[in-house]
Amino acid sequence: MAITPPPTAHIIDGNALGAKLRADVSRRTAALQARGITPGLAVVLVGDNPASQVYVRNKVKACTDGGLHSVLDRYPATMTEAELLARIDALNHDNSIHGILVQLPLPAHIDAHKVIEAISPAKDVDGFHVASAGALMVGQPGFWPCTPYGCMKMIESIGYDLRGKHAVVIGRSNIVGKPMALMLLQKNATVTICHSATADLKAMTLQADVIVAAVGKRNVLTADMVKPGAVVIDVGMNRNDEGKLCGDVDFDGVSRVAGFITPVPGGVGPMTITMLLVNTLEAAERDAAQRGLA
Ligand code: NAP
């Protein structure tokens, strides 16, 4: 019988790192509360998409657990675009709300882009507004999208210096791949972005010191595609044949080659919610500073 060697890669534990960062959020929240300000997040859900319902519940619970104020605004799928825009406008003017998150996807009759653009950039804690994307692009303060922001915190947590390293991002979505590449670039990595039309993905990933897989397909990254010692961050969320949650990376194979690897579950997922709390707290701190209360 073949004996499977133990994994060699160090596992970056998103639950543990998330808990550490959330403890810091709770501390800073308590400091704000001492000055009469409770950071507040409004989560807006339209329709009854089952996955979205789970996501928003988790986000609201994480906020409450961290001492933040959180409201869940649930509306039927029949809500009109005008009604939703009016609700966003009210939240923009609500002083108890520092962050607004509209859970995607929205029903087909609502233009998601128009709704995201209606959120005040000062409350755009998801970092999806064009103003937030632009701020990241030019290196100005703004809100970074939570998932790639969480990936950066994971890389930072192992004390890894990205300067001069080659980072390969697989995937170019507006919410993960593209902002991820910009954040890595900001830390002086040399960045390659791969996508569905990339001619030879393996040739790219084999050169990488850091690989971020954000595709949404199982086994996009296998052991033969990874340079020994590389840092591998797995953003993907898929189901395996047994229906269990898994990432884009062949974890068992790649963890025998990589130096560091994130698991799924327990990796990027918990970090995404953590960074939502961080962004909401940051929004409240900036608001307090602007109003001369900090
Ligand atoms: P997306 O919008 O569907 O983008 C997927 C990207 O992968 C696209 O850029 C696509 O290229 C590229 N791609 C598809 N097949 C490929 C292939 N064979 N080789 C190389 N690139 C390929 O997805 P997303 O929103 O970025 O999410 C990606 C994954 O991350 C999903 O599994 C999602 O569920 C997960 N996710 C997880 C979290 C979390 O908190 N853990 C948060 C967000 C997303 P084209 O642009 O050419 O089509």
Image (tube, rainbow, N blue to C red):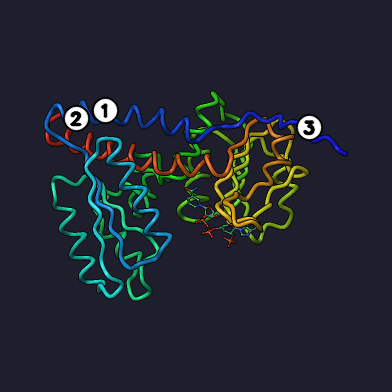
* Dot 2 alpha-carbon crowd within 10 angstroms: few under 14, some 14 to 19, many 20 or more: some
Q: Amino acid at mark 1?
A: Arg
The residue tagged with tag 2: helix, strand or loop? helix
**237 or 112, nearer to the observer:** 237
Q: Which residue is mark 2?
A: 32
Q: Any mark on residue 28, and which?
A: 1
Where residue 70 appears, x then y in whole percent? Answer: 24, 46
Q: Earlier in the sequence, mark 2 or mark 3?
A: 3
**Rendered residue at 51%/33% (across/down):** 154
Q: Earlier in the sequence, mark 3 or mark 1?
A: 3
Q: Amino acid at mark 2?
A: Leu
Looking at the image, can residue 122 be seen? no
Q: Amino acid at mark 3?
A: Pro
Q: Any mark on residue 108, and which?
A: none
Rendered position, 130 above or below 82:
above
**Rendered residue at 74%/41% (across/down):** 253
Which image quadrant: the C terminus?
A: top left
